[in-house]
Image (spheres, grey):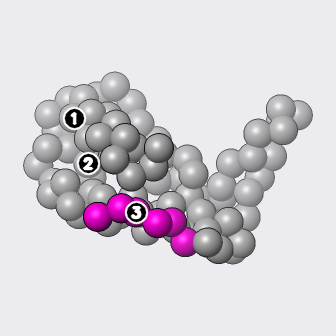
Amino acid sequence: MTFHPAEDRYDSMPYRRVGRSGLLLPAVSLGLWHNFGDDKSFGVQREILRRAFDLGVTHFDLANNYGPPYGSAETNFGRHLRDDFR
């Protein structure tokens, strides 16, 4: 099923400028540490990401050892990014 993001997703989230770069980051970031490993349902991961994006979250915290097992959160996020957010 194709994801269609909420039209108003940027309306209520405050964004803050990063230094003088012009880059804006949301006031809330979603960390994928122990929520997106292979021990969690791929469908639940998808629901969390879609809801966060619909609420204006555009910053997702990843590191090269999130899981479990290590690295699986990054792999899973890449799959979600490819399937839902390209």
CA separation in Å, label 3 and label 2: 19 Å
> Along the polypeptide, which appears first: circle 3 or circle 2?
3
The question of residue 50 being in magenta is answered with no
Q: Earlier in the sequence, mark 3 or mark 1?
A: 3
What type is the residue that disc 1 sits on?
Ser
Name the foreground residue: 52 vs 66.
52
Q: Which residues are magenta?
A: 1-6
For badge 3, the amino acid type reads: Phe
Q: Give the crowd class for mark 1: few <14, some 14-19, many >=20 residues within 10 Å.
A: many
In whole angstroms, how far apart are the C-alphas of marks 3 and 1? Answer: 23 Å
Mark 1: which secondary structure?
helix
- Taking the view exactly as shown, the residue that stands out farthest to the front is 2
Q: Earlier in the sequence, mark 1 or mark 2?
A: 2
**On the image, numbered disc 1 is attached to which residue?**
72
Which residue is located at x 88 percent, y 34 percent?
20
Q: Secondary structure at mark 3?
A: loop
Q: Which residue is mark 3?
A: 3
Q: Quadrant of the N terminus?
A: bottom left
What residue did someone put label 2 on? 36
Is residue 73 visible in the rendered image? The answer is no
